[in-house]
Amino acid sequence: MKTAIVTDSNSGITQAQAKELGIFVLPMPFMIDGAEYFEDINLTQEQFYEKLKNDSDISTSQPTPESVTGLWDRILEEYDELVHIPMSSGLSSSCATAMMLAEDYGGRVCVVNNQRISCTQRQSALDALTLAKKGMSAAEIGDILTRTKFDSTIYIMLDTLKYLKKGGRITPAAAALGTLLRLKPVLTIQGEKLDAFSKARTIKQAKSTMIAAIAHDMAERFGDTTGENTRLCVVHTENRAAAEELRDELREQFPKTGDIYIDCLSLSVSCHIGPGSLAITAEKILEETK
């Protein structure tokens, strides 16, 4: 049985990385000032942030059904089946659409709603690839990824409230007050929801809050106090130097963890958060991949 792994660009996996890994990545569409763009196809990170800073009208969308089934059809000419890992169903309707479309494929397409985004979604795709290479079927892989969907955690520090206000996610008054007080909000993604977690007055305080929260989740939810069985990642929006500094702090806090990957936050999330953010993601290492 030959099983392909598919995800979308919210995973942070670029088209070049996908080819190298042997994974298929569906690019997510954007509308910017009335024109359609696709992440990592005709829109780079640098171009995106330039448009964002120039107050372009940016909105996200889900891939068209034709683009999804077109990709699947091409893959299934070479593979017997595929596992499709979209971004969390709580953050986009693209997962529900993919599940509906999969009904017409006679079991050859397994859509996994394991409620991941960014590096946690990336890791799910990598884990699925490892399991496929071990000979597991699409259904078996889907069962494992679904069963372990809550074994991940994300904390995000915002540098500005401007883009939450612009997207209508906070009121203008709350944004004005937060800006006046120079607050650095920390958000969290647990399962399918993006929620407020805490407020910090400085970047240092926000980073300490995130590290403490990650340590708590690792110990209480993953049963791992050392980081030995947890995979950590630092994600940022146009903030590479700060991300490297945060990675070094995590290495000091969790010396037994493995390599800490640094990535750019996917653009569909970045447009609501803006530049200068930092995030820590963590997921419990799958026993089946060891």
Image: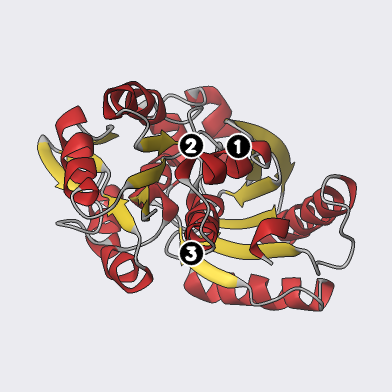
| Front one among 248 and 207 | 248
Identify the residue position indicated by label 1 in the image.
146
Identify the residue position indicated by label 2 in the image.
112
Could you tell which of marks 2 and 3 lies nearer the N-terminus?
2
Task: Give the CA distance from mark 1 to mark 3.
Answer: 19 Å
**Residue under the image location 40 percent in, 52 percent down:** 266
What secondary structure is marked by label 2? loop
Identify the residue position indicated by label 3 in the image.
133
Q: Position of residue 166 (x, y in %)?
A: 38, 31
Could you tell which of marks 1 and 3 lies nearer the N-terminus?
3
**Residue under the image location 63 percent in, 31 percent down:** 195
Q: Quadrant of residue 181?
A: top right
Q: Amino acid at mark 1?
A: Thr
8 relative position to 264: left or right: left
147 relative position to 137: left or right: right
Q: Position of residue 48 (x, y in %)?
A: 26, 54
Quadrant into which the C terminus falls: bottom right
Q: Amino acid at mark 2?
A: Val
